[in-house]
Amino acid sequence: MTTPAFPVRPATAERFDDVAAILGPRNPDSAVCWCLSYRLPSKENRALAPRERAERVRQLCARPVPPGVLAYDSDLVVGWCGVGPRAELHAFTHGRTIPHVDDLPVWSIWCFRVRAGHRRRGIAQALLEGAVEHARGHGAPAVEGYPVDNRGSRVDTTMAFVGTRAMFERAGFAKAADTSSVLNGFPRVLMRRALA
């Protein structure tokens, strides 16, 4: 068995500094998402001060089920993928743009971040596959993603955080539904992969 080019590990409390290196700003007083915008109600999300965001993510990393996975190039953290039970993600449990296909307690993959200077090397694909294994290891019956269906067109780097349909298809996902969500001018589709 060969060692993966970019090993993927859960974002545990012991790896919080690596999570911060990917998600956090250089200036700790700058307001950035910290991958919380899909997880929290918008009012609560907007009310968090910059340093409170970091602390919230630190708390999530300390839970028995980490909030995502990290990719590494040797000892350097080079990527993040948010993955967790859909029931814990406010935007997907209360939003109207991403449909519910059925009542299965699926997990969702909603965010990819790859360190600048390391893009276009397969890190996002490694993160996706690692997220699937993370979900499987925690008993998820299926996992979903909501990428853009860009049909081969280039996606702006700042809007590529949801992934592309082709990327999900390469990881064994199939389209399960259309959505009414649009990102960077591209429609988003609901992709699903059964794990049970």
Image (cartoon, grey):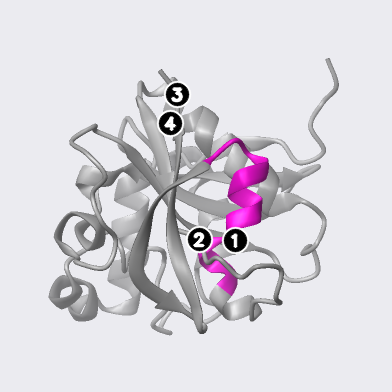
Q: Nearer the viewer, residue 56 or 176?
A: 176
- Chain-order first, disc 1 or disc 2: 2
Is disc 2 in contact with disc 4, using a CB cutoff of under 8 Å?
Answer: no
- Chain-order first, disc 3 or disc 2: 2
Please name which of the two marks, 3 or 4, marks the residue nearer to the observer: 3
Q: Which residue is mark 4?
A: 135
Secondary structure at numbered mark 2: loop
Quadrant in which the C terminus appears = top left
Secondary structure at numbered mark 1: loop
Secondary structure at numbered mark 4: helix
Q: Residue drawn at (23%, 49%), measured in percent from left and top? A: 100
Quadrant in which the N terminus appears = top right
Per the rendering, the mark at residue 164 is 1
Q: Residue drawn at (35%, 56%), measured in percent from left and top? A: 57
Q: Nearer the viewer, residue 166 or 92?
A: 166
- Chain-order first, disc 1 or disc 4: 4
Q: Could you tell me residue 10's position as x and y percent?
A: 51, 36
- Chain-order first, disc 2 or disc 4: 4
- Chain-order first, disc 3 or disc 1: 1
Relative to 57, 119 lies left or right: right
Is disc 3 in contact with disc 4, using a CB cutoff of under 8 Å?
Answer: yes
Q: Which residue is mark 2?
A: 147
Per the rendering, the mark at residue 76 is none
Relative to 31, 89 lies left or right: left
Specify the segment rendered in magenta: 160-173
